[in-house]
Image (cartoon, grey):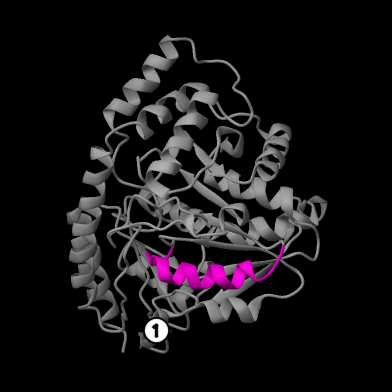
């Protein structure tokens, strides 16, 4: 077979394959061979989209919402998002400061393409979601990893931010609740970080709040709600996690109008507006009483507690107590160097492969998230699957000494 890699752009050749998608494909390949694989690798709710949202989309189709949409989104949806921002986040974004995209991932890509020039640095709180690094690099920026380990609950401090800023810093990018760690930045922590940012002109924050509704800490703080930060913050959110609408591909930003207009310009040349009938269903989701969302959050909380108790029984797993999202990110470095039948666990990739091939549980090695000491486990799965996955991992890893 002819190798055509040399014909591909250097940008593409420098891009990493998504580790979560790669591991998911490996799991599917094994399943196709009849192997019973429990997948804890993808960040996808196992719940179906609530019926009232699906019914709204069906009605929208019947009502003729089948045409192209305005690039930044239907005005009615942007008005609903504006109301949601004020209601839930104490953020005042007008509809002209909101852009609806084909998922929050596109929202972040729009921002990086619109704002970054070669040499611009983007401080990324680490561990980070797998695509952040490649989106920044592909857009011409230079990603700067700012790391925090399990001893800090995976949260960077204001002093770390202060020390990382240079005259090339353009953006700061993070998620809270965080993928992959589940950590949640509290208001006092964000206030301290904001003080650092406000001391520098022309540094902007991209705050990824896609897991906002899956928050067990009692409240969610948007960094843009802190005094002085609204004009310096782009708030990213979407419908995939809180409303179990992953396949609908609907995300959005709230941003200063000049940034929103720039993102709409980028999007207009790549994809144009998001699906019409999906946007109508999104209005229904935002204007609901959120009872379906709250039920899902309660289920995730119960699963988190159950799964942590089970994982504590696995020798070599060091755990924190994540306050949001649906991930656990154990430090597994104590397992490095252990062997069985001549096979040694050298690193997290070795461990993830052993867990997949021997325990038949799909996980993701933490190196893809910027931390080579951890693995990511999603508990967006049934109780039975989580119990069985923990049993399998414990049994398999106990044989490595």
Q: Position of residue 72 (x, y in %)?
A: 61, 32
Q: Position of residue 376 (x, y in %)?
A: 40, 66
Does 165 sit left or right of 218 as displayed?
Answer: right
Q: Secondary structure at mark 1?
A: helix
Towards the viewer: 265 or 186: 186
Q: Position of residue 177 (x, y in %)?
A: 40, 60
Q: Which residue is mark 1?
A: 151
Neighbourhood count class around disc 1 (C-alpha, 10 Å): few under 14, some 14–19, many 20 upward: few
Q: Residue sitting at 23 percent across and 39 percent down?
A: 291
In magenta segment, residue 194? yes
Say above or below: 291 vs 368: above
In magenta segment, residue 104? no
Does residue 392 show up? yes
Towards the viewer: 222 or 273: 222
The span shown in magenta is 180-201
Does residue 239 show up? no
Quadrant housing the C terminus? bottom left
Q: Residue sitting at 18 percent across and 55 percent down?
A: 383
Say above or below: 374 vs 389: below
Does 166 sit left or right of 344 as displayed?
Answer: right
Q: Position of residue 220 (x, y in %)?
A: 37, 57
Q: Residue furthest top?
A: 63
Towards the viewer: 341 or 65: 65
Q: Residue sitting at 41 percent across and 66 percent down?
A: 187
Say above or below: 342 vs 6: below
């Amino acid at each position: 077979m002819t190798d055509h890699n040399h014909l591909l752009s250097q940008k593409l050749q420098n891009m990493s394959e998504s580790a979560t998608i790669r591991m998911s494909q490996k799991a599917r390949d094994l399943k196709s061979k009849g192997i019973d694989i429990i997948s804890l690798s993808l960040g996808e709710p196992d719940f179906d989209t609530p019926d009232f949202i699906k019914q709204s989309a069906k009605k929208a189709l019947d009502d003729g919402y089948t045409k192209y949409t305005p690039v930044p989104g239907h005005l009615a949806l942007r008005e609903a998002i504006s109301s949601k921002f004020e209601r839930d986040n104490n953020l005042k974004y007008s509809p002209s400061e909101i852009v609806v995209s084909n998922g929050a991932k596109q929202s972040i890509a729009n921002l990086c393409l619109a704002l970054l020039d070669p040499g611009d640095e983007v401080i990324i709180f680490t561990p980070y979601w797998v695509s952040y690094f490649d989106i920044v690099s592909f857009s011409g920026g230079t990603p700067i990893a700012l790391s925090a380990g399990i001893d800090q609950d995976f949260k960077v401090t204001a002093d770390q931010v202060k020390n990382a800023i240079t005259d090339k810093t353009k953006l700061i990018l993070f998620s809270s609740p965080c993928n992959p760690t589940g950590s949640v930045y509290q208001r006092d922590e964000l206030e301290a970080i904001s003080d650092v940012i406000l001391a520098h002109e022309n540094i902007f924050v991209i705050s990824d709040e896609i897991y906002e509704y899956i928050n067990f800490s009692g409240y969610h703080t948007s960094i843009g709600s802190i005094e002085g930060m609204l004009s310096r913050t782009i708030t990213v959110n979407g419908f995939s996690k809180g409303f179990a609408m992953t396949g609908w591909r609907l995300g959005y930003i709230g941003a200063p109008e000049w940034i929103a207009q720039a993102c709409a310009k980028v999007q207009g040349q790549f994809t144009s507006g998001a699906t019409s009938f999906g946007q109508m269903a999104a209005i229904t989701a935002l204007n609901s009483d959120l009872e379906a969302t709250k039920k899902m959050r309660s289920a995730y909380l119960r699963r988190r507690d159950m799964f942590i108790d089970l994982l504590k029984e696995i020798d070599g797993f060091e755990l924190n107590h994540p306050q949001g999202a649906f991930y656990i990110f154990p430090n597994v470095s104590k397992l490095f160097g252990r062997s069985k039948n001549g096979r040694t666990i050298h690193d997290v990739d070795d461990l993830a492969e052993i867990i997949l091939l021997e325990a038949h549980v799909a996980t993701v090695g933490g190196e893809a998230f910027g931390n080579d000491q951890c693995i990511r486990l999603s508990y967006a799965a049934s109780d039975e699957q989580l119990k069985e996955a923990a049993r399998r991992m414990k049994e398999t890893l106990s044989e490595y000494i």
